[in-house]
Image: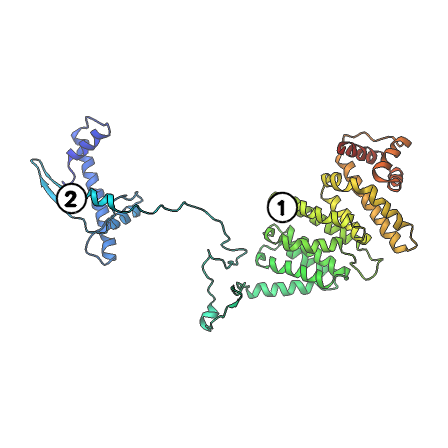
Amino acid sequence: MIYSKGSVKNIADAIGVTKLKDGITTAMAQDVEYRLHEIISEATKFMRHSKRTKLTVADVNSALRVRNIEPIYGFETGRPVKFHKASTALEDIYYVEDEPIDLDTLLEEPLPSVPLEVVYTAHWLAIEGVQPKIQQNPAPVDEEELVNKKPVKSQRQEGVETIPLVKHVLSRELQLYFECITESLQSPDPVVKSTALESISIDAGIHQLVTYFVQYIAVTVKNNLHNLEVLKTAMAVAQAIRRNPNLFVEPYMHQLIPSLLTCLVSKRLCENHTDDHWSLRDGAAQQIAEICQQFGQSYHTLQARIARTLLRAFLDPTKPLTTHYGAIVGLSRLGVSIVKVLVLPNIKAYMSLLDAEMEKDSPQLRDDAKHCQNALLGSLRVLADDSDDLTPANLTSVEKSKLVNVVGETLANVVFSEKDGGRIIAAVLAAAKAKE
């Protein structure tokens, strides 16, 4: 027997298990011997496959891993291990002779270098199936370039090296799908157009086309700034890709928001002023509000940056009234807090500008000013809708004078003529008092 009963008893005594019966120690010794035969046989296979004739610790560790056993630590060595035999009265013992160490030589050796601290960095392995070309990722391999291998000359200018961009491989099926969808979106038939939009909003296999749709929206808005129908279609595409539960659109929001802001606060969105470009601005404002609500947790400064942009457009007297309308509607859609902090304190000063515009002879300016006035009334309704527990104020001259101090006389008269004027007055006065 290779593994004796005495070894089993010694190990049992070392761990506190005493008085083992001979039958148990014999059975355990036989089992240990069987396990050793298994490990040695498995390790020998690794040795033979490695074209070696000497069994190493690495072979034994590989055999242990195959058996799902923790490997041996601390026995790796670059030199062959030699065992020496020591005969005793009971049995022969084999041991590895320790190499003598000269302490003087060890003390005179230089200290090893201090190891670097462990640091972790995060980077994108792939974005929507496309591997970004950064230092941490391996260089992408293009099979066509390997066949027709041509040296790519990098451009150097003032010490800056320009590397070609990563090629986005798109299947032929997705290319045909994108071409078909974009052609359908330009169709005069509303059924064809709505079918294309529905496909974008529910299809689960178009995640690689998100960046192409975002680019399509940006190019469409830029090149058709005065074509109302085309702009409405572009905004419908933006809404469709956002509402598709199978698409991951978060990385593309910074490219989509400028197009939405353009349709919200642009000076002119149609050739004929009588066309309903106001609904397009309302839709763009609603989409921006939904984006802030959806991604506000991930991007804490998103809503603040958009609100700052809209506030500048709202308070700039050189901007046209159409831009003011888009800014007011956009701020109102961002929530009651934005209305309290940014819109309400500036209404009275803005109404003095609006009153001057409404007194002009131009029907177009008066119509634009009327829409801005209604937008401000809508922002006041946001305050009223958020305050369910408020008691409607009495429509008296005292309440009217208080309201005039906050929103100006013209808008106060409009509020008094509304059916829910009492609730609006109560909400506005409560918000103004809280602001003080």
Along the viewing direction, whichever of 158 and 37 lies nearer the viewer: 158
Q: Are marks 1 and 2 in contact (CB under 8 Å)?
A: no
Residue 184, picture quadrant: bottom right
Classify 188 as above or below 136.
below
SS type, badge 1: helix
Instruction: Identify the residue at the far left of this view.
Output: 89
Residue at the image point whose x is 46% and y is 68% from the top:
143
Along the viewing direction, whichever of 97 and 214 lies nearer the viewer: 97
Under mark 1, the amino acid is Phe
Classify 351 as above or below 136.
above
Along the viewing direction, whichever of 165 and 357 lies nearer the viewer: 357
Left/right placement of residue 339 relative to residue 55 reads right
Residue 101: % across, % down:
19, 44
Left/right placement of residue 122 relative to residue 272 reads left
Residue at the image point whose x is 64% and y is 51% from the top:
242
Residue 187: % across, % down:
72, 64
| Residue of label 2 | 97
Left/right placement of residue 369 relative to residue 146 reads right
Under mark 2, the amino acid is Glu
Along the viewing direction, whichever of 220 and 133 lies nearer the viewer: 133
Disc on res. 295: 1
What is the basis of the colouring in this image?
rainbow
The N terminus lies in quadrant: top left
Residue 376, picture quadrant: top right
Could you classify mark 1 by the number of other residues whose Cα lies within 10 Å: few (under 14), some (14-19), or many (20 or more)? some
Whether residue 363 is visible, yes or no, is: yes
Residue 178: % across, % down:
62, 63
Choose the circle earlier in sequence order: 1 or 2: 2
Residue at the image point whose x is 58% and y is 63% from the top:
174
Q: Kindly report the distance in space between the C-alpha atoms of the residues bearing marks 1 and 2.
A: 67 Å
